[in-house]
Every structure is written in structure tokens, then in C-alpha cells.
Amino acid sequence: MKMYGNWRSAAAFRVRIALNLKGIACEEIFLDLDAGDQHKPDYLAINPQAAVPALFDGDGPPLTQSLAILDYLEDLHPEPALLPSEPKARARARSLAQVVACDTHPLYVPRVRTYLMSAYDIPKDQMMGFVRHWFETGLKTLETRLANEPGTGRYAQGDAISHADLCLVSLWVGTAIFGVETAPYPTVKRIAEDCLSQEAFAKAHPLRQPGAPA
Amino acid sequence: MKMYGNWRSAAAFRVRIALNLKGIACEEIFLDLDAGDQHKPDYLAINPQAAVPALFDGDGPPLTQSLAILDYLEDLHPEPALLPSEPKARARARSLAQVVACDTHPLYVPRVRTYLMSAYDIPKDQMMGFVRHWFETGLKTLETRLANEPGTGRYAQGDAISHADLCLVSLWVGTAIFGVETAPYPTVKRIAEDCLSQEAFAKAHPLRQPGAPA
């Protein structure tokens, strides 16, 4: 497989973890998002959304959207499973993943911040309040659910790693980058640290990818 | 089944269409979002995210997040299938659905607009520019992909209705509400109008639900 990604993309990070856990070989091509490589015609032909990741598996069109790619990897390489087989547990793992991938991460990505700064004349330093607000909102939802719902185990859903953990970790590593306080989220922290102590997660970490700051 | 929803929720609309297509009986309880019912303790115990939909299927915890619920319905009631069986086609249907459900709809929901108006002192009428920008960005991505990718058929993915169409339609009906010009998106329009001419979609329409404006 071949994937277009970038060190700082939380979405590419999720996919990278799944590839590592499943032992799938994948060459990652790092797009320079700061240089605007995602807006060049060659890349827009791959993903008109100008976003990473985009994954190629043999012939055929690129696969985009991180959750869709995670499900594709699950379909093609079912072991180790990254979703439970019981339908309600499966739906809970997906729901927790989507708290991050639908209702949190898309709100503070650079394209949204750039638009807000330009359209409403908001200074760059004031944008950090917006970013932190949605981080905190997402983390609070995760913490409340993980601390109270019986489905939580060693991991977000039961005792096996699932898409929920991949998404949780992809959010968690941003707390240091964006200066988000982590003390109010002990259950999220416990799960994130457990995951990040494992090689499949650790070697997928944004700061260990080419192009990342030292 | 029993679902907490609201007439204007695009996420509840997607689920309602799937329930209709699959012929699943479901009582919908309409939360008054304008009155703040989603923030009351009783509902926060169901969904700490203070969002709809939340679905109950017999005993057990509520299911939340529209895409997770759509997959759950697929697991439990596989006919008629709302995802293709071939993995790449399946991934494409999911990816198109996520262009709407991850990268478009969550950006302009009331909680985001309310936060922006309050944190940055943006007048309400100026928020409509923000809403329309993300509508147009999402619709442009969908149009470019649907018009150019070989996977498009009568519907967004091939010739069978999939989650991609449910999400596409849930976005499309908002264009009239938010005053978004539709002429630049003829392929999206063709698919949306085809879907909305069918009873399972039409009777799920936001404006046909209790509480909707006449």
C-alpha cells in the first residue's frame, strides 16, 4: 500500500496505527501541507478535498477519509480485529471514534482556523481559544462516557484495542501541542498512555515522522 | 426501537431514512433543542454530548453518532443493504458519507455558531457566511468527486442507495434553509432529487416531522 500523509495529521496518525497493528506494509509519502502541496493539481486529482490521508491499495482509485480507510483495512485484514464483533459494542466503539473524528477534530483543523481568521479578522493568537474549546469539549465527552459507561475496560471499548482508541490517541497527542490541560480527563489519559506505551502506537506518533519538529 | 431526535437534525434525518428503507419500526421522541432539552440532566445521562440522535434497541445503553447507528442498523438488518459488499466500493461510499458527516455538517451546527458568536462577538447575521462557506466547500467536494469518479452511478456509489446518499440528502435539504446556491452542483442535485422523490426519503424529510415550521 501507499499513503499520502503528513506528520501532524491526526487522521493519518489513526491510519498509521492501524497499519502497524495489522502488520500491513505501507509506504507513506509526506505531503508538505505548509507549502500547500495539498492544493496542487496533482494532489487534487487524488483527493479534491485537499486533505490527507489518501491511501492506494494496488490498482484503483484512492481511498480517503480516515474512518473509511480504517473500515477498509478491517474488511481486508480482519486480524487483529480493531472493532468488536458484538453489534452494540461495535456501535459504541464507532460512536466514541466519531466523537473525535466527526465532532471534534474537524472543527479546529488549519482550514477552519484560516477561514475564521480571514473572514472575521480574528488574530492568530485568539484562535487558540477556539482550538482549546473544542479539544476540551471532545475530551469532556470522552471522559464522561468512558468513566460512566459499563463498556469501558482496559481500552475505550472493552479489553481490546479498537478504532475508539486510535481516535482517542490521535486527539490526546494534540493536548501537548495546543496547551490543553489534561488533569480533568484521567480515564482518557490512562487509556492514551497505555496505548502510547505500545510500539504500534509509539512509532506512528506524529513527532516520530519525517518533517516533524525535533 | 426508540430514537431521540429533532425535526431539524441532519443526523437524525440520515437515521430516519435508513429506518424507513429497512422497514424498521422506531418511535421517535422529538427533543426541543431550542428549549434546551438536550442539556437537561435526564438527556445528558443518555448522551453526555447533548446531541441527537440517540437510539435505543431493546435493553442496553443508547447508541449515538449517526454513522455508528447506520452501521449498527446494517449489522442487525442487512436487507436492503445500504453499503456495497465490494471493499473499495464500500470504502468509497463511506468516504463520501464522511465528507458530509465529518468534514461539513459538524462545522456549522448551532453549538459551533453559538460559541463563535459569543467568543468573538460575531453578529448572528454574519454567521451565515460561515455556514454557507462550509456548505459550499462540502458540496464542491461532493460534486467534483461524483462528477469525476467512475464509482458514481444512479446514486453516489453505483446504482444502489448507500450511506453516501443518506448523508448527501441530509446536506442537500439544508441548502434551501440556509440560502445556498445549488446550480454549481448538478450531480449532487440529480442524486438528491432522485432520492427525495422516493417515499422512504420524503417521509423522513425534516419539514415533515413534528415541530417543523409549516
Image: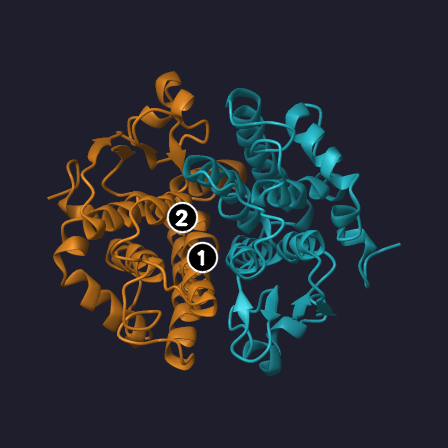
Chain colours: A orange, B cyan
**Placement of A77 over or under A93, stated as above or below:** above
**Placement of B153 over or under B82, stated as above or below:** above
- Image check: A190 left or right of A145? left
Foreground: A34 or B87? B87
Foreground: B188 or A69? A69
Q: Amino acid at mark 1?
A: Gln
Quadrant position of residue B9: bottom right
- Decide: marks 1, 2 in contact (CB < 8 A)? yes
Label 2 packing within 10 angstroms: few (<14), some (14-19), many (20+): many
- Image check: B113 left or right of A52? right
Mark 2: which secondary structure? helix
- Image check: A209 left or right of B60? left
x, y (%) of residue B82?
Answer: 58, 46
Look at mark 2 in the image and give the residue it sits on. A67
Q: Is residue A12 visible?
A: yes
Between the C-alphas of marks 1 and 2, the distance is 8 Å
Mark sitting on residue B23: none
Q: Amino acid at mark 2?
A: Leu
Residue at position x 78%, y 42% in the image? B198
Label 1 packing within 10 angstroms: few (<14), some (14-19), many (20+): many
Residue at position x 67%, y 55% in the image? B22
Look at mark 1 in the image and give the residue it sits on. A98
- Indicate which disc, 1 or 2, sits on the residue closer to the N terminus: 2
